Image (cartoon, helix red, strand yellow):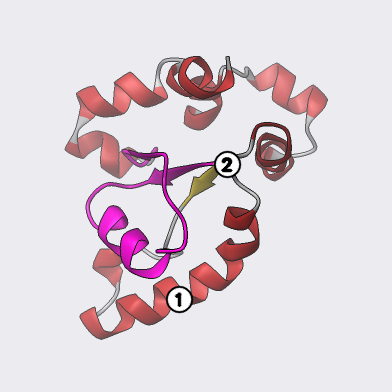
Amino acid sequence: MRVMTSIGIDKTTIKTEYKNPKVLFLDLLISKGICFLNINNFLFKTLRENEIESSILKTKSFNDPIVKKSKKILLLGKSKTKYYFEKFYNEFEYTEVLIHPSERSKQNNEDEWKSIWETNYIQNKYLI
């Protein structure tokens, strides 16, 4: 729900207008060109150093068709995301790097997290 708050869509609207959140994100991609991007399907800290790059490449093969359709790429995660995006997605440019909407990220930087995910930040910056 955090991302939905930032987009400016309430729970009722989501339930009545979208089959599930995936459909909402597909709609944002098609109608607004917005892509919310996780560059890795696993937490970096759960992988050994020698597993990180292969994990990112596997995730990239899934992400590529989505990213190619986007006009605005919003990277989710700050710690290593920007570095690996620039290394493995160098054919694309990101629009902004956002703190990840997870509770773990909230614990690390609550003020920044709240300013993005508890406000209509994305709606105001990218949808209006």
| Residue 93 spot, x, y in % from top left | 42, 50
> Hey, what amino acid is under mark 2?
Lys
Q: Which mark is residue 57?
A: 1
Q: Is residue 102 magenta?
A: no
Between the C-alphas of marks 1 and 2, the distance is 22 Å
Who's the residue at 57% across and 72% down the image? Answer: 61
Q: Please report the residue visible at 31 percent of the width from the left and 76 percent of the height from the top.
A: 52
Picture residue at 50% right of the left edge, 76% below the top: 58
Work out whether 34 lies above or below 121: below
Q: Secondary structure at mark 1?
A: helix
Q: Which mark is residue 71?
A: 2
Residue 39 against residue 26 in the figure, above or below: below
In the depicted view, which residue is nearer to us: 8 or 124? 124
- Vertical placement of residue 104 versus 117, above or below: below
User: Which stretch appears magenta?
Assistant: 72-101
Q: Is residue 96 magenta?
A: yes
Instruction: Assign the C terminus to one quadrant of the image.
Output: top right
For disc 1, the neighbor class at 10 Å (few under 14, some 14 to 19, many from 20) is some
Label 2, residues with CA under 10 Å away: few <14, some 14-19, many ≥20? some
The answer to which image quadrant residue 99 occupies is top left
Helix, strand or loop under label 2? loop
Of marks 1 and 2, the one in the foreground: 2
Query: Is residue 50 shown above or below 72?
Result: below
- In the rendered image, residue 113, in percent from the top left (x then y), is placed at 29, 29
